Image (cartoon, rainbow, N blue to C red):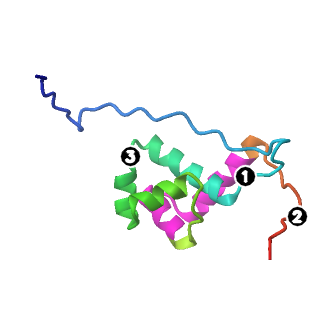
Amino acid sequence: MGQLISFDRERAVRRPSPARPLPVPSPATGREPLWREVSGGVLRDERQRQGRTLADVAGRAGMSVQHLSEVERGRKEASSEMLAAAAGSLGLDLAELTRRCALTRAAAGATPAGPVRLAA
């Protein structure tokens, strides 16, 4: 019916995807990006720059692929331990992760939106 084609992972060329734009405050939402969105984007960008898979990074960090995926997409608030593990598996420490988050926010022109009000 069809022909079986083998895929050699060692020889495959991995192209990093372009960096995801940081969500910036819009007149419609009026909110600045959350820490989890910025840090997740930085982790994803570094993972893709290295040409690594979610499974590889998650395995080295000791977390599930699903959890790392949600952290990268800014859906889950990662603990400092989980951020350190994910960053460490990418060769980054927390100081470097924080520095990159700050640079990403500055490059996007993100500014504080004012006081935060939490629901009781």
Residue receiving disc 2: 115
Front residue of 20/95: it is 20
- Number of numbered discs on residues: 3
* Numbered badge on residue 21: none
- Magenta stretch in the rendered image: 82-105
Within 10 angstroms of label 2, few (less than 14), some, or many (20 or more) residues?
few
Name the N-terminal-most of marks 3 and 2: 3
Residue receiving disc 1: 33
Residue receiving disc 3: 52
**Image quadrant assignment for residue 90:** bottom left
Q: Position of residue 55 (x, y in %)?
A: 35, 54
Instruction: State the separation of the CA atoms marked 1 and 3.
Output: 26 Å
Front residue of 22/104: it is 22
| Tags 3 and 2 touching, CB below 8 Å | no
Residue at position x 69%, y 48% from top? 103
Specify the quadrant that holds the C terminus: bottom right
**Image quadrant assignment for residue 2:** top left
Is residue 102 rendered magenta in the image?
yes
Instruction: State the separation of the CA atoms marked 3 and 2.
Output: 38 Å
